[in-house]
Amino acid sequence: MLVTTKAKEIDGDIEILTVAQTAKLLEAADGDTLPFWAIGAFAGLRRSEIERLHWEQVDFESGLIEVKARHSKTARRRLVTMQANLHAWLAPYRAYRGPVCPDNLRKRIDADREKAQMLERWPPNALRHSFGSYHLAHFKDAAALALQMGNSPDMIFRHYRELVKPKEAARYWQIKPSASASRKIVAFRGMTR
């Protein structure tokens, strides 16, 4: 009789940005790309979801970002809560309409990463993984985070649990724009006020 055993599933380690790296990246960002970085870091949207996002889906009154089903990896609509620091980063864009991301996004975000001295080593899905890890450590609610990210609670628990200490998580959610950040914001082509 042949006995088979199920192979043990070992998840690869995910990598995240430190609080200092996240702050440095946001400060280095150009006014056109700043929303991309802030939404990725503090709302956890996938890159493709941010690239398809329009300002009309960012509801400053309710504090929610709508990810439309046709733009979601899971083909399901979801609403993502804007934490206070994300609201502060996006507040200068409140009257904007049209796409959140500028043309030539890849070239522009590479320029931001170069300016922040983070061009060489970039962890896969760094913004989304950072969001998930810091959110779970701070808010301690895997089910709510799963809804925010469009994942299962099991996946949240497997990937993001215990990657960040609570003290660091608290610091992450305190990353807010400086006065110089709001001076960088100018309308890019295709975006209307």
Image (spheres, rainbow, N blue to C red):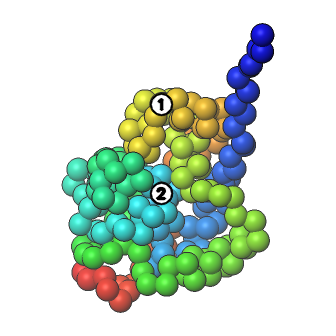
Q: Is residue 103 above or below residue 36?
A: below
Q: Residue at x 78, y 10 (%)?
A: 1
Residue 172 is situated, as x and y percent measured from the top left of the image, at: 57, 49
- Label placed on residue 46: 2
Residue 160 is situated, as x and y percent measured from the top left of the image, at: 60, 37
Label 2: how many Cα within 10 Å (few below 14, some 14–19, many 20+): some
Q: Residue at x 70, y 31 (%)?
A: 9
- Left/right placement of residue 167 relative to residue 38 reads right
Separation of marks 2 and 1 at Cα, in angstroms: 17 Å
Q: Residue at x 43, y 84 (%)?
A: 103
Residue tagged 1: 153
Which numbered disc, 2 or 1, marks the residue that appears first in the sequence? 2
Q: Residue at x 27, y 76 (%)?
A: 98
Specify the quadrant that holds the C terminus: bottom left
In what element is the residue under mark 1? Answer: helix
Check disc 1 and give the amino acid type.
Pro
Residue 155 is situated, as x and y percent measured from the top left of the image, at: 54, 35
Residue 119 shows up from this direction = yes
Quarter of the rendering containing residue 4: top right
Q: Is residue 143 above or below residue 92?
A: above
Check disc 2 and give the amino acid type.
Arg
